[in-house]
Image (tube, grey):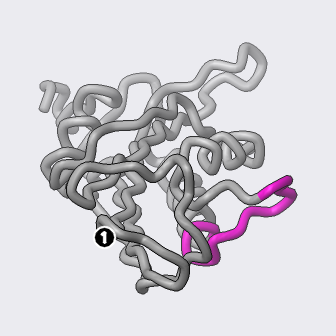
Amino acid sequence: MTLQVRIPTIKIPTRAENRKGDGGKMPATYAVLRYLTDPTRDITVPVAVAIAHWWEPDEVDEGKTIERHLWWRTPEPKERIKGANTRLMLPQLQLATSQINCWFQEGELPHQQGKPEVGTVAWWEHIRKLCQWSIRIGTIGVIDYNGVGERGIETLYRQVVQPRHWWGTKL
């Protein structure tokens, strides 16, 4: 299921050093959500992906605005993921994505030192430390944003999670 969380335009105090783009386009960060299948051996399997994207005009000075978006791709009801019991995993995944959405909307994370900008790699790294439940943050990276949207997140999801139809064939 693809879900986009659109955050209202927000004010930013100054231009951040890591926000350099081409023609106003900004990079996007992604995170792979993993499900803990064997706590004793700390075995996890990838089950979902998220892409955080922000947009700002070419010239961002104090008081200008940016827009942030968080895209999710979680398993569809008829998809199966090798190594994960979908029936047990989905409620926990929904809880984790809901919590991350709240942190994204609030713009703050619990127990944070400094203030990583929402959607950056540092922000995802901090969430990784907070996620000590059965859904965890795995790989984090930066991708070029070029209209990522549904098509881009679907490609990332299929490459990382490799879902299957409920009858067993690969999607």
Most common SS among magenta residues: loop
Residue 78 can be seen, yes or no: no
Q: Residue at x 13, y 25 (%)?
A: 169
Residue 148 in the image: above or below residue 41: below
Q: Nearer the viewer, residue 149 or 131?
A: 149
Residue 131 in the image: above or below residue 112: above
Image quarter (top left, top right, bottom left or bottom right) of the C terminus: top left
Q: Residue at x 19, y 45 (%)?
A: 152
Q: Would you say 60 lies left or right of 37 here?
A: left
Q: Around disc 1, counting alpha carbons within 10 Å, would you say few (fewer than 14), some (14 to 19), or many (20 or more)?
A: some
Magenta range is: 103-114
**Residue pointed to by mark 1:** 57
x and y percent of residue 23 in the render? 21, 57
x and y percent of residue 142 in the render? 41, 36
Residue 86 appears in which quarter of the rendering? top left
Q: Residue at x 55, y 50 (%)?
A: 17
x and y percent of residue 158 in the render? 23, 33
Mark 1 is on which residue type? Pro
Residue 97 can be seen, yes or no: yes
Residue 12 in the image: above or below residue 40: below
Image quarter (top left, top right, bottom left or bottom right) of the N terminus: bottom left
x and y percent of residue 150 in the render? 18, 55
Within the magenta stretch, is there residue 104?
yes
Q: Nearer the viewer, residue 153 or 147?
A: 147
Q: Nearer the viewer, residue 118 or 13?
A: 13
How many numbered marks, from 0 up? Answer: 1
